[in-house]
Amino acid sequence: MGDLARLPLLEKAPTTHAGLLAWVEEVAELTQPDRIHWVDGSEEENTRLTDELVAAGTLTRLNEKLFPKSFAAFSDPADVARVEEQTFICSENERDAGFTNNWMAPAEMKAKLRGLFSGSMRGRTMYVIPFVMGHLDAEDPKFGVEITDSAYVVASMRIMATIGTEVLDKITATNAFFVPALHSLGAPLAPGQADVVWPCNPDKWIVHFPEERSIWSFGSGYGGNALLGKKCYALRIASVMARDEGWLAEHMLILKLTSPEQKKYYISAAFPSACGKTNLALLDPTIEGWKVETLGDDITWMRIGKEGELRATNPEAGLFGVAPGTGWGTNPNAMRAIAKGHSIFTNVALTDDGGVWWEGMTEEVPAHLTDWQGNSWTPDSDKPAAHPNSRFCTPIDQIDMLAEEYFSPDGVELSAILFGGRRKTTVPLVTQSRTWSNGVFMGSTLSSETTAAAAGQVGVLRRDPMAMLPFIGYDAGDYLNHWVNLSAKANQERLPKIFLVNWFRRTADGGFAWPGFGDNARVLKWAIERIEGKADAVETPIGYVPAAGSLDLTGLDLTHSHVEDAVRVDPEEWAAELASIEEWYGKFGDSLPAALRSELEGLKERLAAQ
Ligand code: GTP
Ligand code: MN
Ligand code: MN
C-alpha cells in the first residue's frame, strides 16, 4: 500500500479471502479513494446511504404516503442510457469477440483503463459490494464483487441482486471464485471541491475481459452501465461462462402458465428491448381459467437438468423496467409492485405532491409537473416530462403474481421458448418451429424494427439474434453453435418447443392485426395445446401456424378471417425476407453453424416449391 492511512481499513476487512483482499488493495492503490466501505446490505446501511444521497441532492425523497421508502434520481442529460458504441469485449483474440462486438487487445485496453482509473476515486468513498446473481444456495452460486464510488449504485444493486454480509461470508467460507467488477464515475474530487448532483465523465468505457471474467466500467452512473451484475455480468460475462460450462445466459422473461385443468407450464421468451418482455411476464390473461405468474422479466439462465430437461432461473432480484408506457391501464401488476415502494426511479417526472409520473402512467395527464431535467412542465410543453428511457427499480418480491418457484435454486422445467420482435409485416402472430435447430434458426434470424423518429416512417429492420445482439460476450457464430449443440445434451422428448411470435403486425389500414397484451394469453394457450397435441396447425414453408378455429377467440370481437391477417404467410414478403436473412448470415463468415446454413437452404427450397 502506498498510503498507510488506508491499511487499517483493509485489516478490518470482513473477509480473509486472499484473492478478494488483494484485488481490493490493488484497486484502492490505483483509484486512491478517501475511504473504503464494505457493504453489508443491511437496512441501517441503506438508510444511511440514501440519507447521504438525499443530502447531496442525488436522490429526492418521495412522498411517504404515495411511494413509501422511495426516491427519484435525475442523471446528467448525457448519461441516460447504455452506451453500445463504448462497450467492448476484450478477448485475447479478436476473432473470439466476433462481428457483433467492439474489440481492443486486452493489454492495450488495460493500459488505457489504468490511466483512466488512476486517482479516479479521490475524495470519494470506495464501496465494496459482494453480490450473487441467482440463488445463494444454488449448486454453483455465481458470485461477483462490485467496487464502485457511487452510493446510488450501492442502493440500486441492493434492489437488483442479493448483496452484503451473507454473500461475503459464503465467498469467504468456500474460498469462491467471484467476478471482479470495477466501476468508477470518473469524477474525483479535489480537497474542498463541491460535488455535483450526478457525477460522471464524458469519456465512458464499458469493458469486459471474457477470459479473466472481469468487468471495468468507467464514466457512467446509468444502470445498464453501472449496475454491473445485470447486463455486464448476467448476460455478457455469463454467456461466456455458459459457453464453457454448457448452459445458456439469455435476454428472456420466464412465466408460469396454469391451465384450467391445473396443469403447470413454464415458458421463456426473448424479445429485444422495448418489445414486451416485462408486459408478457406480468400478463393478465383475458381467457377464462388460465392463470399467469411471473418468474422473471429480463434475464434467464438455462441449464440441462439431471433428467435431460431444460431448466430456467432468473438471476435477478429486482425489476429495472422502462417507465414510460407502464401504466394502470396497460400493466397494473407492475404498477401495484411499484406502488409498494422501496424503489428508485431515474429520470421520471415529479408531481407537485411528491410523487412520480411518466407518459402513459395514467390516462389523465397532471396539470403541472417538474420534468426530469428540473423544469416546470405543463401538458402544453413540447417535450416529454419523463425521459423516454426513464426507469423504475423495484424489488421483484413486490409483484403479487410472483410464482413461488422464483425462490427455487433449481428453477423450472421449460415447455416452450418464444422468440419475438417488432415486425409490421411478414412475420405471423405465431409460428411453431419444425425442430430444435429450426427453432434456433428462427432465433438466429430474429429481427425488430427500430421506431423511426418521424411518425409513419417505415422502421429500420435490425437483426437481433435471440434478442442478444448487444449482450453476446463472444463470437456470435460460436454462440449460435452453442444453441444448436445444446439439444444433443438434452432428453429429446423433454426439449422445449420453440415458437416465433409477433404482436406487432399491421393490417392494410395501419392498425395492429392482433390486440396483444392480455390477449397474448390466447397465443400461449395455442402453443401449449400444440405441445399437448390438441390444437390444429397449417404447415407452411416457415413452420406451423394456427389453423382456422384453433386460436381461442372467445369473448373477442374477432373472427378467424380477421386473425388471418395476423397469421398469414405471404410468399412475396418471404421472398424479400429470405434475401435479407441471406445478407445477415453472410456477416458470420465461416463461424455460422452448418446446421443453420442447411436450415436456410431448407427454407429456400420450401419457399421455391410453393
Ligand atoms: P427491456 O426491459 O428494455 O429489455 O424491454 P421489454 O422487452 O421488457 O419491453 P416492455 O415490456 O417494457 O415493452 C414495452 C413496449 O412494448 C411498450 O411500447 C408497449 O406498449 C409495447 N407492447 C408490449 N406488449 C405489446 C403487445 O402485446 N402489443 C402491442 N401492440 N404492443 C405491446
Ligand atoms: Mn433488457
Ligand atoms: Mn423490461
Image (cartoon, rainbow, N blue to C red):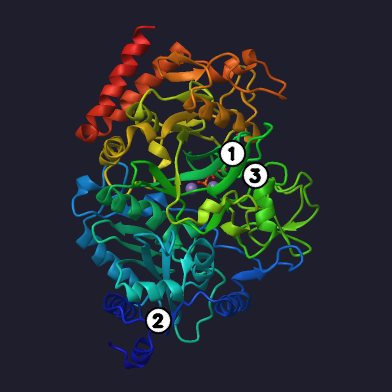
Front label number (1 vs 2): 1
The disc label shown at residue 522, or none:
none
Front label number (1 vs 3): 1
Q: CA distance from mark 1 to mark 3?
A: 27 Å
Q: Is residue 542 visible?
A: yes
Assess disc 3: are there few (<14), some (14-19) or many (≥20) residues with their C-alpha within 10 Å of its C-alpha: some
Q: Contact (CB < 8 A) between labels 3 and 2?
A: no
Q: How many marks?
A: 3
Q: Is residue 383 visible?
A: no
The disc label shown at residue 325, or none:
3
**From the Cβ of disc 3, is ligand 1 less than 8 Å away?**
yes
Q: Position of residue 340 (x, y in %)?
A: 69, 61
Q: Amino acid at mark 2?
A: Pro
The image quadrant where one finds the C terminus is top left
Front residue of 169 and 33:
169
Q: CA distance from mark 1 to mark 2?
A: 52 Å
Task: Give the mark, 1 or 3, whose residue is nearer the N terminus.
Answer: 1
Q: Position of residue 537 (x, y in %)?
A: 50, 17
Q: Residue at x 38, y 29 (%)?
A: 439
Task: Give the mark, 3 or 2, whose residue is nearer the N terminus.
Answer: 2
Assess disc 2: are there few (<14), some (14-19) or many (≥20) residues with their C-alpha within 10 Å of its C-alpha: many
Residue receiving disc 1: 258
Q: Amino acid at mark 3?
A: Gly
Q: Amino acid at mark 1?
A: Thr
Residue receiving disc 2: 33
The image quadrant where one finds the N terminus is bottom left
Task: Provide the secondary structure element on which disc 3 rests.
Answer: loop
Q: Position of residue 214 (x, y in %)?
A: 30, 62
**From the Cβ of disc 1, is ligand 1 less than 8 Å away?**
no
355 sits left or right of 568 in the view: right
